[in-house]
Amino acid sequence: MQVEETIELAGRTLTLLRPPSAEELIDEEAFAVEEFLPYWAELWPSGVSLAEHVAARDQHGRRVLELGAGLGLPSLAAALRGGDVLATDWAEDAVALLAANAARNGIALRAEVVRWDEGDRLGGDWDLVLAADVLYEQRNAEQLLELLPRLGGEVLLAEPGRPFAKDFLTHWHVEEIGDRIYRLR
């Protein structure tokens, strides 16, 4: 069973499916191995804010990558505004649901399972890199510090104030371009 959410984005009404409870998806074995938690299963306010910001900008002709996409609302927004989008997450269930939500709304994008320690698979020369609420753990910050400079392009991070964000942001020239939405250089 899944919950259906209705979201207004880029002049369209989207219907998204999501799990009814992220807590019900916790797998003790997966957590024991990699501290895997189903963060992807929530429609986080940071993702909504970043999606609204992206939807307000023309993305035609831009190669857009979302890291830690989860339900992928920023990716859906970028695709609706004309971007060539690759949405990534390390959770197979997240990627499958994101692809299904894109299809059910008639939105063309690619969705792939990619871990941040497999960054070579992503290449470089992205025009826009998106990430919303991805700094849950210290290891996330460390991996992103290594990965982001290799991806190229403009980096937009929506960050609600997670514990590891403050130190992470000291490594960048940061411009706040929206409420807790940052351009990193």
Image (tube, rainbow, N blue to C red):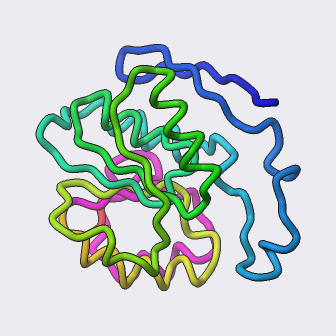
Residue 43 image offset from top left, x and y in percent: 63, 40
Residue 32 part of the magenta-drawn span? no
Give residue 10's quadrant in the image. top left
| Left or right placement of residue 75 versus residue 71 in this view | left
Image quarter for residue 152?
A: bottom left
In the image, residue 174 sits, relative to residue 84, either above or below, namely below
Extent of the magenta region: 154-182
Question: Compared to 135, does 66 lie above or below?
Answer: above
Vertical placement of 181 versus 107: above or below?
below
**Count of picture labels:** 0
Residue 158 inside the magenta-drawn segment:
yes
The quarter of the image holding the C terminus is bottom left
Q: Please state if 19 lies on the left or on the right of 175 as rendered.
A: right
164 and 122: which one is in front? 122
The N terminus - image quarter: top right
Question: At 76% from the left edge and 30% from the top edge, which residue is drawn?
Answer: 2
Give residue 147's position: percent from left, percent from top. Answer: 35, 78
Is residue 86 placed above or below 48 in the rendered structure? below
Image quadrant in which you'd find residue 170 = bottom left
Q: Residue at image x 59%, y 40%?
A: 97
Q: Residue drawn 49% across and 71% down?
A: 115
Name the outermost residue toward the left: 61
**Position in image of residue 57 (x %, y %):** 23, 34
- Pick the residue in front: 62 or 136: 62
Q: Position of residue 83 (x, y in %)?
A: 23, 38
